[in-house]
Image (cartoon, helix red, strand yellow):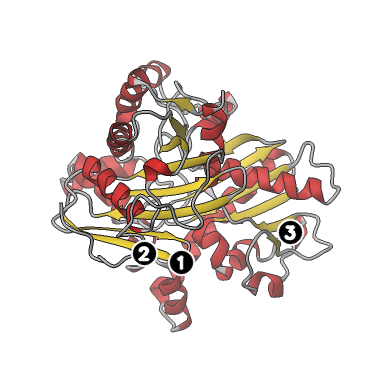
């Protein structure tokens, strides 16, 4: 393993000493691990106080030259060198904590929370990880081949490095586990669907749960009766999803068996006629792997206009790029279709909440999505929408019957809170 690329990083000379902002004995410190196919994100925090002690990422796992970084207050640490697998990645995580003076074994970690995308019908709540649970997550890889295998790798690595504290799996699908039968069931042959576990599972559930809960808390704190609250949450990032939530429980969500269904995304098609797959196989001679790559990695905004970063897309539109303009129109058209259908599914609408990178930071998307909807009780305040400000904020007019909010998501905090609750029994 290579030496850290920043040998003079704060804390590197006295790894066993905790920094000034380190968690102390008696705190409720949780380590959150989010393992991707070539990355491992991590955050050390106290979910009760909402205090983040450190966060970072290991990137390019399995590639020739890996890299890692950590930020803890004003302290920074980094690593460059080969990262062949997730076990080595977790070893580097431990080293990075040492670099910033937060030796992980001395940080009073009470539990490790692991983000797992697919829990299938087996897991509808955060679950302590033992060998059986680990194997069940691996078995569900057929439903999430891009996501569950690296999650298992991260679980194995973290349990090996931190064997004496509880590990908890928090599932992206759990919030949507009890969707009404009418919204979770596909009109597919029942025998086939049952045999191959085909149903709507959803994804981004931790974010939708966190945001919808924050909306309810906000309205309650203002003295509004939030019982029966009908809200649509739009999680718009490189991956994007929508949910309809009534009185805190999801009624529908846009992602389905996999995270491919639903909204237009950075590189994914979202909804598309399934016969396209057959057509591409028959007419273009594309293999299953070719089509899978096309739909998940070469489509969406990237496929439409060659860009997936909305900073680039909005600038291109300002510069008169007609391809980028059409891509934006396709993106917004899909959003409006889901917003309208969910309003009907809920029997009315009280709140629209925008969240995640695009939802929180791209006013053009919000404005286009809600333009011309005053007749449906949705009136955007353009000045509020254009403002840049932290925290939860209202961007509709004061007299808008439907309230429109920007609600910054915090999936790590939600995972840590669920993990702590399980660890405490």
Query: How far apart are the two marked residues, 1 and 2, measured between alpha carbons?
Result: 9 Å
As drawn, 167 above or below 224: above
User: Which residue carries the number 1 mark?
Assistant: 74
Residue visible at 69% across and 73% down in the picture: 382
Question: Gap between marks 1 and 3, in whole Å?
Answer: 42 Å
Q: Nearer the viewer, residue 24 or 111?
A: 24
Residue at image x 81%, y 55%?
401
Q: Quadrant of the C terminus?
A: top right
Whether residues under marks 1 and 2 lie with C-beta atoms below 8 angstroms apart, the answer is: yes
Residue marked by disc 2: 10
Residue 73 placed where, x, y %? 48, 62
Residue placed at 53% from the left, 45% from the top? Answer: 24
The first of marks 3 and 2 along the sequence is 2
Separation (CA) of disc 3 from disc 2: 50 Å
Q: Is residue 170 above or below residue 270?
A: above
> Can you identify the residue that label 3 sits on?
378
The reply, left or right, for residue 413 in relation to residue 150 is right
Pair 1/3: label in front: 1
């Amino acid at each position: 393993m290579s030496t850290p690329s920043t040998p003079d990083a704060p804390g590197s000379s006295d790894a066993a000493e905790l920094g000034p902002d380190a968690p102390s004995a008696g705190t409720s410190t949780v380590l959150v691990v989010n393992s991707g196919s070539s990355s491992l994100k991590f955050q050390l925090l106290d979910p009760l106080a909402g205090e983040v002690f450190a966060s970072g990422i290991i990137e390019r796992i399995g590639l020739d030259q890996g890299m890692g970084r950590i930020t803890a207050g004003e302290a920074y640490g980094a690593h460059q060198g080969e990262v062949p697998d997730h076990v080595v990645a977790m070893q580097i995580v431990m080293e990075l904590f040492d670099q910033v003076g937060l030796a992980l074994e001395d940080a009073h970690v009470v539990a490790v929370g692991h983000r797992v995308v697919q829990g299938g019908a087996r897991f509808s709540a955060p679950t302590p990880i033992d060998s059986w649970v680990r194997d069940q997550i691996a078995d569900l890889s057929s439903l999430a081949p891009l996501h569950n295998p690296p999650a298992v790798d991260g679980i194995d690595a973290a349990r090996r490095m931190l064997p004496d504290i509880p590990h908890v799996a928090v599932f992206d699908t759990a919030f949507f586990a009890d969707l009404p039968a009418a919204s979770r069931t596909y009109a597919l042959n029942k025998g086939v669907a049952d045999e191959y576990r085909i149903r709507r599972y959803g994804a981004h559930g931790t974010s939708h749960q966190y945001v919808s809960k924050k909306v309810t808390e906000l309205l309650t704190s203002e003295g509004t009766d939030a019982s029966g609250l009908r809200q649509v949450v739009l999680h718009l990032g490189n991956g994007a999803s929508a949910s309809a939530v009534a009185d805190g429980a999801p009624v529908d969500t846009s992602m389905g068996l996999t995270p491919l269904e639903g909204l237009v995304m950075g590189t994914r098609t979202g909804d598309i006629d399934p016969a396209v797959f057959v057509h591409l196989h028959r007419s273009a001679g594309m293999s299953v792997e070719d089509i899978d790559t096309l739909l998940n990695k070469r489509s969406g905004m990237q496929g439409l206009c060659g860009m997936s970063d909305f900073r680039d897309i909005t600038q291109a539109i300002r510069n008169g790029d007609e391809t980028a303009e059409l891509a934006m129109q396709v993106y917004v058209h899909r959003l409006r279709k889901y917003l309208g259908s969910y309003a009907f599914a809920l029997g009315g609408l009280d709140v629209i909440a925008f969240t995640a990178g695009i939802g929180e930071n791209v006013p053009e998307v919000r404005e286009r999505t809600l333009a011309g909807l005053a007749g449906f009780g949705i009136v955007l305040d353009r000045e509020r929408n254009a403002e840049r400000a932290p925290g939860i904020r209202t961007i509709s007019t004061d007299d808008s019957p439907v309230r429109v909010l920007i609600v910054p998501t915090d999936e790590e905090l939600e995972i840590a809170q669920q993990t702590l609750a399980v660890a405490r029994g």
